[in-house]
Image (cartoon, rainbow, N blue to C red):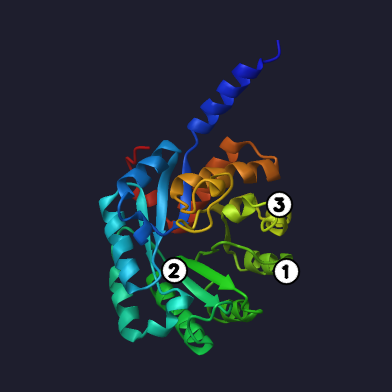
Amino acid sequence: MPMNRNSAKETQYSVLHTLHLFDSHCHLDDRSFFKDLAGTLQNARDAGVKRIMTVGVDLDSSQRAVELAESNHGVYASVGVHPHDAKTCNRSVIEDLSRLAAKKSVRAWGEIGLDFNRMYSPRKDQETWFVQQIQAADSLGLPMIFHERDSVGRFLEILKSHFNPQRKGVVHCFSGNGAELASYLDLGLYIGVTGIVTIKSRGAELRKLVSDIPLDRLVIETDAPYLTPAPQKNKTRRNEPAFVKSVLLKLADVLQKDPMELAKATTANAKRLFGIDSLETGFTL
């Protein structure tokens, strides 16, 4: 006997309610979360988001990310200097970040890279401190979270020259072309997909390329409070980790995958990327 419409909806709700998701990139230290962080984390748990990576962009935000990770179960931190902030970086900052990275909750270095779109920091500073941070992360054995925008091939040149293929890394908020995707995959990198994939016009090219990402290299992320996905984009400007479910569901639709299967795969990928399995003996979802 075919399932009636109400039963189908109930089954779909039950499945979606039991998804276990990992938001592999957000910024919980952002001031937009200052007044309601506890509620934001509860929203995430209610949406099935059991693990969150909160990402540093300079020394101050990296320190706050570590504090958040140490005081909230299921939250992990990365430390690093974003290319926008490269002009503020120096050896002392790298040394301070390296000391922070010794904390158990710190599972990555980033986000680091190049951004030649807005040029908030001079190109020379971006390139210098990108290389220095790759070397620092490598010396500590940490995976890296990469940012690239409009670098016209320079980002890949630096990676090919300095990135140790024995390390893991992820291209955060992938928005490149097919050739760039192939190069990232050849380097063994993971690919982070954000809410851009849900946006009708802006995400069109990304939706064409996601099927070229091997299932074992795909992770999902929000970049909260930025890049709010549809349908939440029509209701609020601020993104939050709970909305990573919308990224997952859109990907499942585009890839014609079962949402539960895709949730398991992307969570396993993020845990492997950040070396989290070894930390979670007795972890309770």
- Graded by Cα atoms within 10 Å as few (under 14), some (14 to 19) or many (20 or more), the crowding at tag 2 reads many
| Mark positioned earlier in the residue sequence (3 or 2) | 2
Of the residues shown, which amino acid type is indicated by label 1?
A: Ala
Please name whichever residue, 258 or 65, is drawn nearer the observer in this view of the structure.
65
In percent of width and height, residue 6 lies at 61, 17
Of the residues shown, which amino acid type is indicated by label 3?
A: Ser
Residue ID for mark 1: 179
**How far apart are labels 3 and 2 at the CA level?**
26 Å
Residue ID for mark 3: 211
Left or right, 207 with reference to 117: right
Element under label 1? helix
Q: Residue at x 32, y 40 (%)?
A: 282
Label count reads 3
| Mark positioned earlier in the residue sequence (1 or 2) | 2
**How far apart are labels 1 and 3 at the CA level?**
14 Å
Please say if the residues under marks 1 and 2 sit with CB atoms less than 8 Å apart.
no
Quadrant containing the N terminus is top right
Where residue 70 sits, quadrant-wise, is: bottom left
Which label number is shown at residue 110? 2
In percent of width and height, residue 165 lies at 55, 70
Which residue is most to the top?
Answer: 1
**How far apart are labels 1 and 2 at the CA level?**
24 Å
Left or right, 134 with reference to 5: left
Please say if the residues under marks 1 and 3 sit with CB atoms less than 8 Å apart.
no
